[in-house]
Amino acid sequence: MTTDIKSSAESSVCVLASGGLDSAVLTWLMLQADADVQPVYVRTGMAWETVEYLWLQRFLAAISSPRLRPVQVLTFPLEDVYRSHWSVSGVGAPGFESPDEAVFLPGRNVILIAKTAVYCAMNRIGRIAIGVLDGNPFPDATEPFFDSFGRALSLGLGVPIRVERPLASKSKVEVLRAGAALPLELTFSCIRPVDELHCGDCNKCAERQRAFLDAGVPDRTRYACRRAIV
């Protein structure tokens, strides 16, 4: 279900917060819509999670609000099914010039939403917001998927759960411009970090740099290296 932010503000919403640009701006927009925001971070065993979560905490601290609750960390380990996949091993992560399809993580939205829905049902929260953008090429990022999955979760949990995609009609450039005044240098988008830095050489770093450039927004991100965007 695609829902307009301004018309959907209710008492509480769980925002799937990865610490990346999209979920960071989404968290802030939900606060601007007068919602009580519960950020949820789901640990699945990905190679970049320790660094990613560190930056998420920094960003949330920077946008502190009485309506922003402390981040809730959930766990849903995937090492047993992903095994030697690059997302778990950190070996062979898609590089700077790889296509977007190369970073597909099978079932990622299924897993993130399912675990969060159980948390919502146990804590009387009826909404889950996820920062999926327009043009996302993956099968678990489509309107039919979210609509049907939301209905299935509501039936299975015995409580109404609404899965919202407030950014579904927006590009990353539009999202960046909407959040241009935020401390976006505290967001994190890298799949093979170098210490606490963006590597500057992976698919997600390329996407990030290109979005800042196209949006005309200064990129204050610290990268381990910088490559030319063509």
Image (cartoon, rainbow, N blue to C red):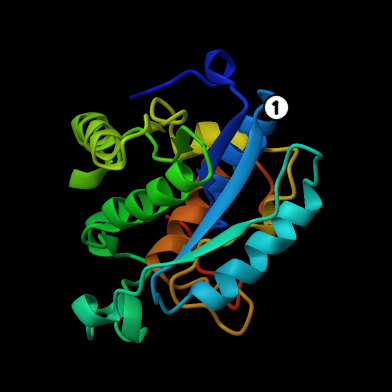
Q: Amino acid at mark 1?
A: Gln
Q: Could you say which is closer to the camera, residue 206 or residue 147?
A: 147
* Residue 220 visible to an observer of this rendering: no
Quadrant where the N terminus is found in the figure? top left
Q: Residue at x 40, y 75 (%)?
A: 46
Give the percent coordinates (x, y) of residue 74. 48, 63
**Structural crowding at the residue carrying mark 1, measured as other residues with C-alpha within 10 Å and reported as few (<14), some (14–19) or many (≥20):** some
Q: Position of residue 212 (x, y in %)?
A: 57, 47
Q: Quadrant of the C terminus?
A: bottom left
How many numbered marks appear? 1
Front one among 146 and 203: 146
Image check: 173 left or right of 10?
A: left
**Residue shown at 56% from the left, 68% from the top:** 52
Q: Which residue is mark 1?
A: 32
Residue 6 image position (x, y, % from top left): 58, 16
Q: Is residue 12 above or below residue 38?
A: above
Task: Examine the rendering and report whether any part of residue 219 can be seen.
Answer: yes
- For residue 156, which quarter of the picture? top left
Please, is residue 210 above or below residue 146 in the view?
below
Does 8 appear above or below 95? above
Secondary structure of the residue carrying numbered label 1 = helix
- In the figure, is residue 37 to the left or right of 117? right
Q: Residue at x 39, y 46 (%)?
A: 117
Point out residue 66 in the picture as x, y percentages from the top left corner: 81, 39
